[in-house]
Image (tube, rainbow, N blue to C red):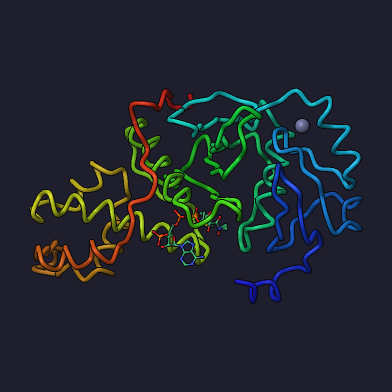
Amino acid sequence: LREHEEFTKVKNIATIELGRYEIETWYFSPFPPECNDSLKLYFCEFCLNFMKRKEQLQRHMRKCDLKHPPGDEIYRSGTLSMFEVDGKKNKVYGQNLCYLAKLFLDHKTLYYDVDLFLFYVLCECDDRGCHMVGYFSKEKHSEESYNLACILTLPPYQRKGYGKFLIAFSYELSKKEGKVGTPERPLSDLGLLSYRGYWTRVLLDILKKHKGNISIKELSDMTAIKAEDILATLQGLELIQYRKGQHVICADPKVLDRHLKAAGRGGLEVDVSKLIWTPYK
Ligand code: ACO
Ligand code: ZN
């Protein structure tokens, strides 16, 4: 991962403090010029305002009355909650989130026109408040059927299944909209690995249940995964043959089982019964 840094702008902020974590950054992020002489920035973990000095943050924490992201809680299961933040109603929060996210995203052009986006912020909640674990952004209206623009799990929370939870969540929203979706390109290496893992597991589970007797179109209708992504995933698993000008799924049960074993853990499940949401109008 680190080798990317050579090709991007020189990193400005080396570390950030966020809640109880001190986090080393990965990439350049275009913070306002007055921040550029600081190696470390201090974030309020709730409103995401950032400051150059610890004392400023301490003063801020005494008067900041947020204990969760500004917006509607649309999902709660156990200690896990998802908040939907409208970039138009919460511009500063949206911008702060983009600055923060860019520290861990390389080749993404981040949109600072946050009006056009909704932000889905995943939190672990306890008696001190709701602590951000990660998020994804989504265009309010996408011509290209993107159902996710940027996704991030904060480094202290990575590799615990939150990424796959966020991806699964983005497809649950698409299902509620009655649309298929796909992530905005390009994907980072880690983004591609996570998506491939998610697509593989979801598709293999269905193929196993239906003993392979199912079309790509039907798979797409069931999962809200775009047909092209299904085809690419199944081709990668060598489950597609090309017969008489048509792609056909060839799902030998033994091959399915082998792939399923290799696909690893399923990750945190989205409990759809706990999602209370209507599509953006
Ligand atoms: N090394 C190898 N494989 C990895 C790694 C890693 N460091 N991280 C994730 N993976 C793969 C694994 O296959 C993993 O599944 P497994 O643990 O069952 O083997 C799978 O990805 C997903 O793991 P999760 O724990 O569910 O994902 P995580 O919470 O770590 O989040 C994410 C993944 C969001 C991509 C995270 O790595 C991240 O925030 N990276 C920085 C930002 C980024 O690159 N975002 C994607 C950009 S593309 C876009 O936004 C459209
Ligand atoms: Zn605050």
Q: Residue at x 8, y 68 (%)?
A: 244
Residue located farthest toward the front when viewing the structure as drawn: 127
Judge whether 240 appears above or below 54 on screen: below
Q: Which is nearer the eye, 246 or 75? A: 75
Q: Residue at x 80, y 42 (%)?
A: 50
Residue 223 picture quarter: top left
Q: Position of residue 14 (x, y in %)?
A: 78, 61
Quarter of the image where the N terminus is located: bottom right
Q: Which is nearer the eye, 275 or 116? A: 275
Q: Position of residue 238 (x, y in %)?
A: 21, 71
Q: Which is nearer the eye, 192 or 78? A: 78
Q: Residue at x 52, y 34 (%)?
A: 140
Q: Position of residue 166 (x, y in %)?
A: 46, 44
Drawn side of residue 160 relative to residue 34, left or right = left
Drawn side of residue 199 relative to residue 183, left or right = left
Residue 117 picture quarter: top right
Q: Residue at x 68, y 41 (%)?
A: 113
